[in-house]
Image: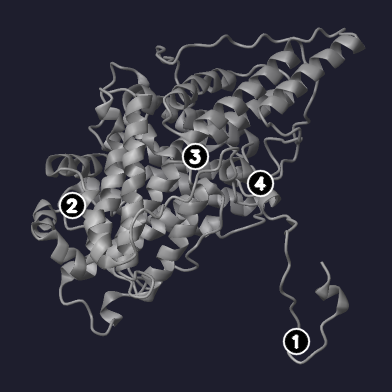
Amino acid sequence: MPRGPDLYTPRNPPTYPFATLFHAAPDQCIPQLLSCLPAMEELFEYLAALEKKVNVCALPHVPVEISRSEVERFLFDPKKNVMMCPDMLALLFSALALGAQHSVFDKGGGKWDAHVMEAETRKGNVYIAAAMQALRLASFMHKPSLLGIQALIMIAPYLTNTGRFLEAWTLFGTTIRLAQGIGLHRHPRYLDPAPPSQRECRIRQKIWWHMLHIDEQYSLTLGRPLGISGIGDCPWPRELTTDATMLRFGEFANHFTVLARQILSSDRLTNIRIDDFTDAFRGLLDTMPETLQFDESWSRRETSIPDWPLSAMAAVYFCKTHTYLILLNRQRIEKRPVLPNIPTTKTTLPSFRPVNRTPSTHSSPTTSAKASLRGRALVLASSEALLSAFLFCHDREPGALIDWTMGQQALNSCMLLLLDALESRKGTPGVMKVEQALAVFRELADNNVHQLAGLAVERISWCLQELRNMVQQPQGMDAPTRALVQAEAAQIGETTRVPRTVETVMGNTGMQLLEDLGLQAFAHEAFAPIAYGIPGGRIPMEATRY
């Protein structure tokens, strides 16, 4: 399984994302920052791309519109306005960075293009460095503002999608403190003075609940603890719309976040609690609007699907739900655990099927049959279901794959299905979907869409080779031949950095998907200049030695 060190400490770690490119003095810094802005036409193209594609994260209360009139008003006298409100410039730069990232697929002519990806990433890196410099001009840590907090919120997903997971997670922790510092977690009516209008109240509520959603999603995807310990007394905002679908989706998303945060805060769950949470998630998914309930038949070209962004939102929440079902049920204690490495008859692995395949027309298990699944069976079924949604996005909404969240969840599902095949020592139906997902990851890696796509290709390829070596061994293999096969597998593992540890599908002891002791172990420091003790007491001799 992919672990924290694989994601957070790659072989070529990225540099500090907020490069020092600008002078410290405002009179020199501001002209430099303004020179980084693109031409007006390109600027509004990036903002339009952000408005169109930001829904790919499937989080409610996202910035669905950036007012053109407000941007034009700010840029009418840019130097004067930056002096008065540098955090507005920070917000603009962070929106440009995210817009550049989300425009790559369309700029590549409806396909991933490595050259376009590289060019837009270079621009995006300059934009987020400029955004952080503008925040420094605003003294954002001393004087937090809604504009500054919104800028930081948009910088974080850009960092995540470019492989800077630790930076995004750490930066979001700062954002939480700033939001709490201005009372976003409180009901607006308790503030003194209170916001003067309902509009200002709703903006504060939407930002806070958006942060609650992000916090839950980071914890799920990155395997880190929740950053916000409590929801606070800020109620979720009521949608001012008559669209029944959007009203139901808003209610669903907020209930989803509350339930997800409750689960992520739990540990050492009993089977009864696991089953209760499992049923709660299944029941909640049924309350989603029908048009947003993902169906595996959507992968077929002849099947009509909801318009963008509803189709992508449906797939994302489908994946999130099944990820929680996987996390929960991997902890379940089975009465009859499946023992690994049980010899079976020789089975030939299914051959690779190309990604532009004709999806299977065989019927899926009935709803009642799926509802009865528990434990290992549910983990494997949810892993296959999640890969179906991942492949759907590749086939019909490929632009959605710019967000790494679903890619990370698909990688985890691939590894679980491969672990199942390795434990049973035979090819399984799930391996076919893994091979299809591998082709998608390879495409993303070849076009530099995601750094971790390369890790996915390495890890999945190694496991597939291990499985092939295992199932193709004759039952009467002599010792020298068996040793040769094992040596070849070990060489593949060494080349791809795959640890030679024994892992199983079941047996998790908590809700953290990726976190492990590899990042929390003792590390020898080159210097130890400080000794700790009680003031006035004698310093032990060993504390003064290194």
Is label 1 or label 4 in front?
Answer: 1
Residue 238 in view here = no
Q: Are marks 4 and 3 in contact (CB under 8 Å)?
A: no
Is label 3 or label 2 in front?
Answer: 2
Q: Is residue 164 above or below residue 500?
A: below
Q: Are marks 3 and 2 in contact (CB under 8 Å)?
A: no
Left or right of 139 on screen, residue 16: right
Q: Which comes before the other along the chain, label 2 or label 4?
A: 2
Label 4 to label 3: alpha-carbon separation: 15 Å
Q: Which comes before the other along the chain, label 3 or label 2?
A: 2
Disc 3 marks a residue whose amino acid type is His
Q: Secondary structure at mark 2?
A: loop
**Residue that mark 2 sits on:** 66
Residue ranking furthest to the bottom? 536
Label 1 to label 3: alpha-carbon separation: 51 Å
Q: Which circle marks residue 331 in the picture?
A: 4
Left or right of 474 on screen, residue 377: left
Label 1 to label 2: alpha-carbon separation: 55 Å
10 Å crowding of disc 1: few (<14), some (14-19), many (20+): few
- Name the residue: 67% across, 29% down: 419
**Residue that mark 1 sits on:** 534
Q: Is residue 483 above or below residue 67?
A: above
Q: Quadrant of the C terminus?
A: bottom right
- Marks counted in the figure total 4
Q: Nearer the viewer, residue 441 or 84?
A: 84
**Residue that mark 3 sits on:** 322
Q: Position of residue 249 (x, y in %)?
A: 29, 48
